[in-house]
Image (cartoon, rainbow, N blue to C red):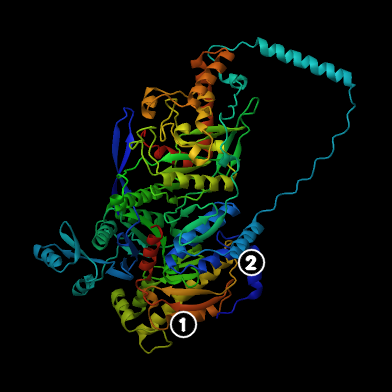
Amino acid sequence: MIPVAAALFDARNMATQEHPAASGFVETWAGRVKEPLVRLRFLRLAARLQEEHATTEHTIESLAQFLVSEARVRPTNSELREAFAELEARQPKPEVVEPPPPAPRKRKMPRTIVAVAAAAAAVVLVVLLRDMDLEASPAEDDFAMVSETIPTEPAGPVPEAERTSGEVWLVSSEEQIELYSNGLRVSNEFLTHTGPREYAVFPRGPGVNPEDIGEGSRPVGVVYHVTHSELAPMGRDNTNLILRQGRKLLNYIRTERLYNFVIDRFGQVHRIIPETEYAFHAGYSTWSHGASHYCNLNTSFIGVSFETSLADRDATTGAPVATDAQVTSARLLTQMIRDRFAIPAELCITHEMVSIAPKEGLIGYHTDWAGRFPFARLGLPDNYQTPMPAISEWGFRYDRDFVKAIGGEPWAGVQESVRSLRTDAKRHGLSERAYRSLLQRKFQQYLSRTRALAPQQSWADQVRQKPRG
Amino acid sequence: MIHEYWIFGEDADHHVRRRNVRMETAIDQKLLKGLDVGTSRIVLARKAEEHYQYEAQLNAFVSLPYSRMTANMLQREGIMNRVEGPEILAYGNRVEEFANLLDGDTRRPMQYGLLNADEPKSLQMMETALSGICGPASDGERICFSVPAAPQERSSDLTFHERTVKQILEKLGYQAQSLNEGLAIVYAEMEASNYTGIGMSFGGGMCNVAVAYLGLPVLTFATTRSGDYIDQSAASVSGQTSTTVRLHKEDKFALNGLSSNSLDQALGVYYQDVVNAAVDELERQLAETKKLPKMDKPVPLAVSGGTATPKGFADALEKTLRDRTLPMEISEVRLVDDALNTTAKGCLISAMLEM
């Protein structure tokens, strides 16, 4: 061994910066990977997560899932705890902000004078608002005067399963298969990665400041898709063909990073992208809930796709065929995701409900489930009753092509949204067309903001905007 | 592998539409190559089943007067060549035979690790060499090629060199990426230490060094004192040609102290000079860098490259390192098993990482 100057070594340590992959647990976990190439990939993933300043949870989950899927080793619970503690200890401590000094006391005005002044101000405000003249062609400044409607709660009773969704936890993880406490089995065989979720949350509600844009990093909902893929007829004789088609599909989805989960025709759930990372599933899309608007839902919603196709519709319902196994697995998967991220039932929606074509101002660029998703069988309320924010709040519309594509009249939520939009337009003294135009301009501003905040994802959204189907 | 895949969808007229999608599944290992673009040799690495396969060519050419007989002979012998007006430029392993016959020296497309600005045919010969060694790419084929670290005064030359080599390979149809030569040594040789350590490649034109931590380069640099410097300096003081010196060096020379042979004596002096230059620069760079992670354990140092193959080189390097003060402990200094092909192997490993 070559001796070292110890004093110099200590002095150098004090001067060094943190190396991207300088974590004790990374080195320990890497040592358990036997295959050299896989170990090198693991180290590069660790460095990338550190450089991206990924959260502790995301870092550990990504690295652990990599080990399980690529190296077939699973960190023990104590290793996970140690890793978590090590990463948390390295997080920067929040600055201690000194409270501002107390303001000097002012002389209080007599209460009666304050009350009279407030009443007078209110009267002036009411008069001003009542006499405000809204022009037929509203200007940009009129945005502030457009009140926002909050959709009503979805109609219909809430299913028993939805009300009582219990805790779901990971029971075991072996040989790339995860077993959860509700019976869900998830395969990580086709697991790959993109990057952490980062999205803008736009304010919603009357009187909000449109500049008060928040940031999110946890998934807030689920969007259900169909793969629109080649389907051999279901039957024992076609088992091998169906499996081959399925694997081709999964490899394609993995390469293109299209969804977080895929449920194949035999009901096997495949995790393609971890839930904490975005997938390119939603393209141009929008949804609103509570006090928040979301644009381009790749980063804010989890994408779950059924291996099925609109070309293969149920003769009675007109819906894409989903096997009983798929529906059962989707129900268990939804339970797990909802429990893990505290996602309300009304934010488990379908692609045709959120998909838009911004340039044309149309909804339903994609029509995956054609308004026929089996919400009740997944223990969810009928979210097709929910008014569509794209219409009522952003002025989108639908055309005859949309009606043809879904095979009939649009679902209740679409019709309710159109009624709501017309009512609001009348209330503001605007024609429906002018009101739509106003809302669309506001949406374009939010869309530009979304692109500016995550340009690489927006570019990818555009590249992956598939032909209508 | 490319699969044809059909996706069904419905268009606006409610017609079922079938779309052909070409998609790439897991990359076949056979479609990956590693390329060591060295001053004196170009080495191509491939993996067949569990074994690495290598193909090397001397990175040199010689100019012969054109005649049909000469052209046919070169073709028959499988020697890469290019006709340029009244001359034929022959390239590769056997050009030294012609150089000896003509009592001259070979010409080099590269010098000190980069494209040779003083050689008017350097670009054409690099293209001939790379297309001859690598061949046209199959669909989706990937290649990773080595590049040196930028010498202080020549960073723009490195940019030109890297881009030119990449363009040539992309013209052949490859998806090309580059890798620092010193880091290639780390990838090839340091799996036991979790890819933490120092890789030193003593090639023909340059000595490339990379200090890596968990597979990430912390520090890379190069010195221009290596094989060619030894050959030219020893040739100058001994009255021989560089080629003769190089052949003697590769055949009989050992670094083991004072020699009665004047050529060996000169080689010994310049070899030590090369070692000193590399260690001096390593000491200086480690002292100045602010990016050094805390290395709790001693790290290995692996030495590679044709210039490092003479017996006694690794010992001389270790002895020189012992006399210096470094901010990290070095556990061992070892010459890699296959010093001529390790850089190419490291490049192939890098290409495989992107699978």
Left or right of A124 in this view: A364: left
Instruction: Residue type at mark 2: give it.
Output: Asn
Across and down, in percent, residue A169 comes to 57, 53
Report the residue at 60% width, 47% height from top: A166
Q: Crowding near pointer 1: few (<14 within 10 Å), some, many (20+)?
A: some
Tell me the quadrant of the picture where the N terminus of chain B can be found: bottom left
> Can residue A297 be seen here?
no
Q: Is residue B22 above or below residue B123?
A: above
A159 or B135: nearer the eye?
A159
Is residue A115 something one can see in this rendering? Answer: yes
Q: Which residue is at the front of the view, B65 or A301?
A: A301
Q: Is residue B227 above or below residue A189?
A: below
- Element marked by disc 1: helix
Q: Residue furthest bottom?
A: B260
- Would you place residue A275 above or below residue B260 in this image? above
Query: What subunit carries mark 2?
Result: A
Q: Which residue is mark 1?
A: B315
Q: Which label was assigned to residue A13?
A: 2
Within the image, what quadrant is residue A258 found in?
Answer: top left
> How far from the left and from the top, in percent, is residue B35?
33, 63
Name the spot of residue A51 as percent of width and height, x first: 55, 54
Q: In the image shown, does A161 or B194 lie closer to the viewer?
A: A161
Splitting the image into 4 quarters, where does residue A164 fall?
Answer: top right
Q: Are marks 1 and 2 on the same chain?
A: no
Residue under the image location 48 percent in, 33 percent down:
A354
Q: Secondary structure at mark 2?
A: helix
